[in-house]
Amino acid sequence: MVTAQKRAENVQSVPVAITAVSGDMLTAKGITDVASLAGQAPNVTLRSTAQFGGSSSVLISYIRGIGQNDFAFNLEPGVGVYIDGVYLARNIGANADLLDLQRIEVLKGPQGTLFGRNTMGGALSIVTRDPGNEFKVKAEVTTGRFNRIDFRGSVDIPLVEDRLVASLAVSTKHRDGYQERIPYTGYTDQNPIYLLATGGAYGGPTNTNSFEGNLYPITSQKRPDRSGNQNQTAVRGKLVWTPTDNLKVRLIGDYLRVNEQAAPFSLLRVEQNAYVAVYNTCITGNQAVIDGVSAMAGLPGLSNVCNGIRGNVGSPTGTQPSLASQAGQHLPYDGRYVVRKADGSIDPDKSYAAGANFNIVKNWGLNGQIEYDVADNLQLKSITAYRKLDSRFGADVGGDPSGAFQPTFGDDEQQFTQELQLIGKGFGGRWKYVFGGYFFHESGSHVEGVSFPGGLLQINSPNDRYDTKSYAIYTHNNIELIPDRLGITIGARYTHENKWFEGTQQDENSFVYRLMALPPSVLADPSDPTWLYPLGRNTQKFNNFSYRIGAEYHIDRDIMAYVSYATAFKAGGWTTRLTGPLFDTTTLQPLPAPTFGPEKAKTAEIGLKATLLDRRLRLNFAAFHTDYRNIQLTFVNGSSPVTANGGNGKIDGFEVEMNAALLPHWSLDASAGYLNAHYTKILPGIPLTGDEDFVNTPKWTAQVGTSYEIETGVGSFTPRIDWTFATKTYNDETNTPDLMTPSHSFFNASLTYKMPNSGFELQAGVTNLTDKRIIVSGFSNAEAVYSGVFSRPREWFLTLRYSN
């Protein structure tokens, strides 16, 4: 049963491509967070690490080639994530713990009518379990590699018989990081650059939380000697009150606390371009070399940069030491910091990094729901929710002991949503309708601290402020033209959105301004050479009409064919990450804040849903074509990540899913998906040829999972194996080969023993059975630093469960 159309229906009767995974199946597969669903649905890519943020709480989600590869507040997700009907505006913290779950619905294609904004690729709808009317306890404890200790438990508490029930669910996850930070012996104890970065004499990274002496902008000070651990706690409470037979009230509260190390980035390569070349020139300490490079490269201010002259002497953080004076003490930033194994391959379990290494998230929310049956076939439903997100995270992406490139971030965000739904049936049940109204308000502030080698750039956004309000009305209608045979679907949604943003980004060292010896006229604030972002409040408004039309035909009671055409949009925004003044190169006058417009998608789909062999086989097929316009592309301009509407594209594909129980104790689930995503137009000024693959979009995906329950006199044994496959995937829009995820297969295996008549079961398993180590996320900045996060190593686990 799913609620893809805002009412409980059998998944096989809904004319939409849906992958529905039950809570029991998630338990059997050992899946405990959203990103771990990766590979379970065709044409779906889920990852828990953004390009360079370092937070494993960020959910990068793509469905059918559409999504968002960044966590920045100025960018909207392309796939909507909903928990119990409440939209999560940020993908920070969206890699939710799947605690006490009923099911997950992966809804494909544009969901712009029923779900609304930012669901162009589709939606992930997470539905938690309602408490039952009997006292019930479920608990499990897991141990495993890297000192893993997890606990998950829930309890159902009936308070008033058949009227008031409550549940409480708790989860804790703890395991050590698998990447070790090791000393690099090329530094002396008295290296001044290293002392500035770490605040102490060199002796290898330590667990101290002090960055005494660090003069670069940074949002936190933690730098433990390992990366890639888990340390989080999740709590969910639910109260369900049924005072009368036609009224139900739910109050849901959830809390997530994460205090972890950063994602384990590995330095892949250093290219001697851009700021790396400037840095390496400076530390020669040879004024003749510095002057020669200055003349050859057309960098008139290079000497001043190398000798540590700041743009704003009064800045509390803007301090760049004289790099020229470090000759002989500080090594060039180059490939020597790539850690390799004996065979020459990159070692993903070791790093020379010594800088930022933290992921701190607090995410909580309250959700109040009222369902009132006005009449036998008419229900009024209200969903009122408030959510609060506080996060600080950062990683040493540069991978060397001087903290060459260690971006850190902070987000304080709150959102309020109110939705009203009128759900009913008319004309003897032949017309099923939903009419709704929706209000969304999000506000918050964002902090960034990004330092480049030697503090040449010291990007600081102390308090970027943003605010978004969205209003929508919608309707969705299923109309039976011929009872039990032919029906049509008509849906529409109108959205009005207001956004404003005020940027505060600065370069505390005024690097580009000084390096190019620019005139004061180019500055956003002529009185402050550190200020980068155009002054004042920036506003945008968007209006959108999305719709869905379709038809379904029931060949018989077990086979349905359908066609649909649906549209959706994703709002525009601003480029916010500048590394130099923004000005007109002809007039040398500052430019306004750079904007980009909304994306739009239109998808035509045909599908077939069949339940065969006396309901022992479920087989679903869908084929689709998407017209994708004004694609928001992020690329590096100089050293600034810039987002712009880069062009148009088309996406063609198909997917097939099967669930089978052909024998009483044997289960089999399998799926496969194909995508042909390509650009049809690239706009001028976009650094793409048009031949690139879409980001995070493998051409083929597939999965097979099977289990067989063996009954014995001492209980049952259920071996299970799961296989997932994806072809090569590019992690950035320019398809950088270093950052590519190659074609790969992953295998997980487990054995579950159920004790008879006891409520206990024991599961032993191994994830990444073949110990496949491949890049799963990557980042490059201005063709200089190439870093990637590798897949986790092979890990064993042992889980003991109890349920009464």
Image (tube, rainbow, N blue to C red):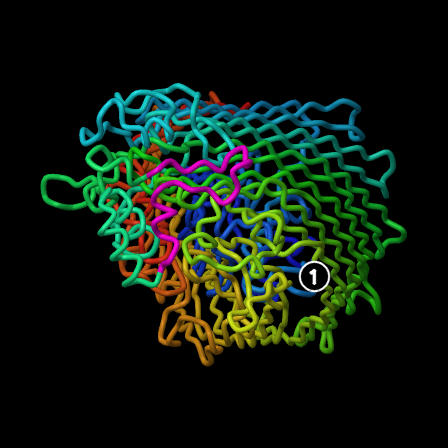
- Amino acid on which the number 1 mark rests in the picture: Leu
Residue found at x 35% / y 54%: 780
Between 486 and 515, the residue placed more toward the observer is 515
x and y, in percent, of residue 262 in the image: 41, 35
Residue found at x 18% / y 32%: 186
x and y, in percent, of residue 276 in the image: 30, 50
Give the residue at the far bottom of this rendering: 680
Q: Dot 1: what SS?
A: loop
Between 789 and 105, the residue placed more toward the observer is 789
Residue found at x 87% / y 37%: 244
Residue interval drawn in magenta: 299-322
Number of on-image labels? 1
Give the residue at the far right of this rendering: 374
Residue found at x 59% / y 40%: 462
Asked whether residue 108 is in view, the answer is yes
Crowding around mark 1 (Cα neighbors within 10 Å: few <14, some 14 to 19, many 20+) is many
x and y, in percent, of residue 551 in the image: 64, 76
Between 774 and 220, the residue placed more toward the observer is 220
Asked whether residue 715 is in view, the answer is no
50 relative to 499 in the view: left or right: left
Residue 670 lies, with reference to residue 174, above or below; the image says below
Main SS, magenta residues: loop
Quarter location, residue 49: top left
Quarter placement of the C terminus: top right
Q: Which residue is mark 1?
A: 114
